[in-house]
Amino acid sequence: MTSTSLLFLPVAVPLLGALLVTAFPRTSSILGVTAALASSAGGLWVTAQTWLHGDLGSVLGGWGLPLGIGLAADGLSAALLAMSSLVGLGISVYAIGYFAGSERCTHFWPLWLLLWASLNGVFLAADLFNLYVMLELLGLSAAALGALTGSREAIAANLRYLLVGLLGSITYLLAVALLYAGYGTLDIGLLSERLQPSPLAATALVLMIAGLALKAALFPMHFWLPPAHANAPAPVSAALSALVVKTAFYLILRLWLDLFPAIADAAAAFVLGALGAGAVLWGSWRALRAQRLKLLAAYSTVAQIGYLFLFLPLIQATPAGAARDDLIAACVLMAITHGFAKAGFFLAAGLVQQKAGHDRIDELGGAAQSMPATTFSIALAGAALIGLPPSGSFVSKWVMIGGAFTTGQWWWLIVIAAGTGLAAAYIFRVLGHAFGLEPTPRCFLTNARAELPAFLLAATSGVLLGLGAGPLWSLLGLSGGHA
């Protein structure tokens, strides 16, 4: 592992930006965008260093492990860090116009930068207690951002989100306490060397996975997500759906592969896969029946999170080697693709809601003619959510299907096929109304600068990540080849 003293930058830069925006609220937009650019640069720098030099590590506070605050970056964390950097930058640019002239601007920027710092902290933290601290900051800032509209529905939904998040954090913290009592360290690297199969370790695994699954909105613990995401401002909805729920799954995958490989078994993987299958089917069905565009996108997030959990039983049943590496990389690729796609979708939906005065799907007639770039963004993001080529999710589903055949778990193919068909149905339902000729109650007028972030994010998910998926295998340091 290469040591670097600058590994703290992706956490420190947005945190400093949040402090500056709070101190100088009159220039919040300028300071906020400047901080976003610097934060994005810091995250991409860490990704580039990981690509060039391999795993990175740093210990803060002048103490060695396990007393010092350890930070670490490998291919997995670097890939998610790059996603948060690019998606976060797109959201920040979009937020300038979205909040222009609104008092909510001064509240958005410090909370958003605090959330960004927490996200990066989750990806870089090297011990279980610091992960807990970052998860708490992430949940608090996310709930506050979601309630920015001030509507009764938003406040109620995000209060529920806050309480559910606290329950998940407490469950996770209980597991941390058990592990510390049993093994005397919370550093993930040291703990993985000491951890042995035992009732204590198994209990800690169950508690951690349960708490994080609650934060990830895994079915049937998803009840808090649709109202919280659908009633938040569009930039916040994009951040919550594209980034925040990914951190919980990232931690589940990280703990499953690095900390509990000797504890996690096929039965546990099957349970998580079955819950993922329920998420795919239920989330897709509810998205198909949704009457609002943002609510459709929120239920789609429930379904897309389910696909990520379908990978776990396939990974668990595949021996170490190229095939298993392909499954891990395809899982990460799907998470990243969904991050870009859902950010682009929510930002486009926000433009529709602002310009039309509503986001009712049945009343979107004429949107394609008046807002062609926004409609195209929805189509590109939708192609990634369906899994159409050349999107990154097409590559991921192809590898997933191969893994299901190889491991003999053919029943997951039914879920994949049904989820893909339902996704196609709800995306084409939206596009069908958008290309309709019914008169709209208000004129759709927007400008190219407002539409650009949504388009670039959607194009990344729908085209670039599929055509350029190969380098992800190199970043993750896996032996498998690009399917």
Image: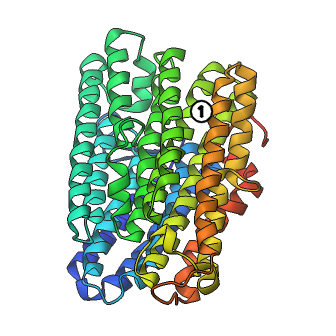
User: Residue 31, position in %: x, y?
Assistant: 35, 81
Nearer-the-camera pick, 329 or 63: 329
Residue 204, position as x, y percentages in the image: 33, 22
Quarter of image, res 152: bottom left
Residue that numbered label 1 is attached to: 311
Q: How is the image coloured?
A: rainbow
In x, y percent, where is residue 137? 27, 53
- Residue type pointed to by label 1: Phe
| Image coordinates for residue 444, horizontal then vertical, percent | 52, 87
Asked where in the image residue 125 lies, by quadrant, the reply is top left
Left of 277 or right of it: where is 353? left
Above or below — where is 56 with respect to 399? below
Crowding at label 1, few (<14), some or many (≥20) Cα neighbours within 10 Å?
many
Residue 456 falls left or right of residue 96: right
Please state, as top left, top right, bottom left or bottom right, where the C terminus lies in the image.
Answer: top right
Say if 380 sits above or below 185 in the image.
Answer: below
Taking depth in this image into account, of 275 and 453 the one nearest to the observer is 275
The residue lying at 69 percent from left, 41 percent from top is 397
Residue at the spot x=63%, y=26% of the render? 314
The secondary structure type at the circle numbered 1 is helix
Residue 455 seen by the camera: no
